[in-house]
Image: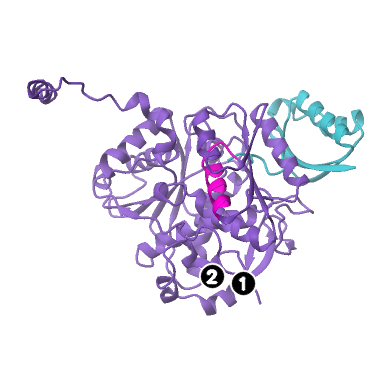
Amino acid sequence: MANLKVRITFPEDKIKEPIIYNAGKNYKVVTNIRRADVTEKTGWVDLELVGEVEEIENAIAGMKDAGVKVDPIERNIIE
Amino acid sequence: MSKIKGLVCKECKKTYPAEAVHVCEFCFGPLEVAYNYDQIHTKISKEKILNGPLSLWRYEDLLPIESTPTVGLHTGFTPMVHAKNLGPKLGLDYLYIKNDSVNPPTLSFKDRVVAVALTRAKELGFDTVACASTGNLANSVSANAAEANFKCFVFIPSDLESGKILGNLVYNPRVVAVEGNYDDVNRLCSEIAGEYPWAFVNINLRPYYSEGSKTLAYETAEALNWRAPDHVVVPIASGSLLTKIYKGFHEFERLGLISDLTTQIHGAQALGCSPVATAFKKKSDFIQPVKPDTIAKSLAIGNPADGFYAIKIAQETDGIIESVTDEEIIGGIKLLAENEGIFTETAGGVTVAVLKKLATQGVLKKGASVVAYITGNGLKTQEAIAPAVGAPSLIQPNLASFQQTLKKERQ
């Protein structure tokens, strides 16, 4: 089992969508929210994903396809 | 008792031992170094600093290492120039340029953070260091790793310009060019950092690495005869530099090395990558990530980890975070070069252009002391200004031809 810490950022038009719920439903990953700031317009969620590496990769791809930004918890590393 | 108390989460304040960790396991907030200031207070003094080495290590008592410095022994203590030409042009009597474009060994402020990170890496027993970079950081890690006998991995996007790759390859690190877009490369590097027992300087060593930036504040206060300036203008990429300059001044005040700290901390971004300036203007805590589109590549961080903290500091100190266009950035580079003989890279152009904007807006007053941080060297980004600097006058090898040209130019 692997775990990955990510920052998910929601654009305004995706704020109503149950993207994290869907990630857990559609892929074999456990989602665990650690910190978040979500308003009616925008928001971010710091999320832990636990599962097999391939399932985590698929869950991330699924969330990106659903229209949210998924970054490592460190955000931008390339300096 | 060590001067390092440990690491502390900036959000939930949970503490951790001073190891190679960077994220709070509880709330995923960033970790930073906590110090035993009472112990430091008994050791540090102006006299001790003045008698210290002519490098950033003169402030060793306030840096997160436990033994003696081993890396970057000539880094820091860069010139702080009273800008006697540029100042009056901007209506400022006491404008100073903190010139890290000549910071050894690789001519950018990154040598400060890398000196601290690699010294700490040695203390923690690492034999391999790594980073993900498109420029200054890669240069600094590669050069310092070579000198300090570390194995070194540098990850770069595969479409990076050849000139920049060459500047790293010369130090003979292992350069890995990763195919894919910026986000792909970014995420892979985060995963590699979690997988391998390496000192990834700006990931698992980030709490130590970022502390190196504080030395810019220390050097500023020392150069101003133990006073903090009225204003500073700081470029923002991740936002870390701005937060550490704030921390540096506050530590000096806490330890009695300066007093009456009222410095207004201003931030500078390129308009083509200005998520922090945008949030600041909207009075929002939320940093909306952007896709960078600017010539200021060294500041092109679209989702800055410390942007939130940079905004808080600007607000707390009555500072302003401004952004400038690419055209203004080139203007800033030329303004500094033509007036002070300092050739800075595009990040410096951003700083000078914002400095000019703040002076024009009346935020910076004539009699106030103002320090602008110039963080990198123009020789590294010559392509950015090539179209804007004109061309030499071509003449025949005779005096008449020269005189004719001179006459034309005088007309």
The residue stretch that appears in magenta:
B133-147
Q: Colour of chain B?
A: purple
Along the horizontal axis of the image, is A9 left or right of B80? right
Q: Main secondary structure of the magenta part?
A: helix
Label 1 environment density (alpha carbons within 10 Å; few <14, some 14–19, many ≥20)? some
What is the x, y in percent for residue B48?
Answer: 44, 75
Q: Which residue is mark 2?
A: B61
Decide which of A67, B211 is in the foreground and name it: B211
In the structure shown, which secondary structural element does the residue marked by tag 1 occupy? loop
Compared with residue B144, is residue B185 higher up or lower down, i.e. above or below? Answer: above
Q: Which residue is mark 1?
A: B3
Chain coloured cyan: which letter?
A: A
* Identity, as a three-letter code, of the amino acid under mark 2: Asp
What is the x, y in percent for residue B193?
Answer: 72, 45
Decide which of B308, A16 is in the foreground and name it: B308
User: Residue, x 76% and y 51% (percent of image)?
Assistant: B27
What is the x, y in percent for residue B185?
Answer: 67, 33
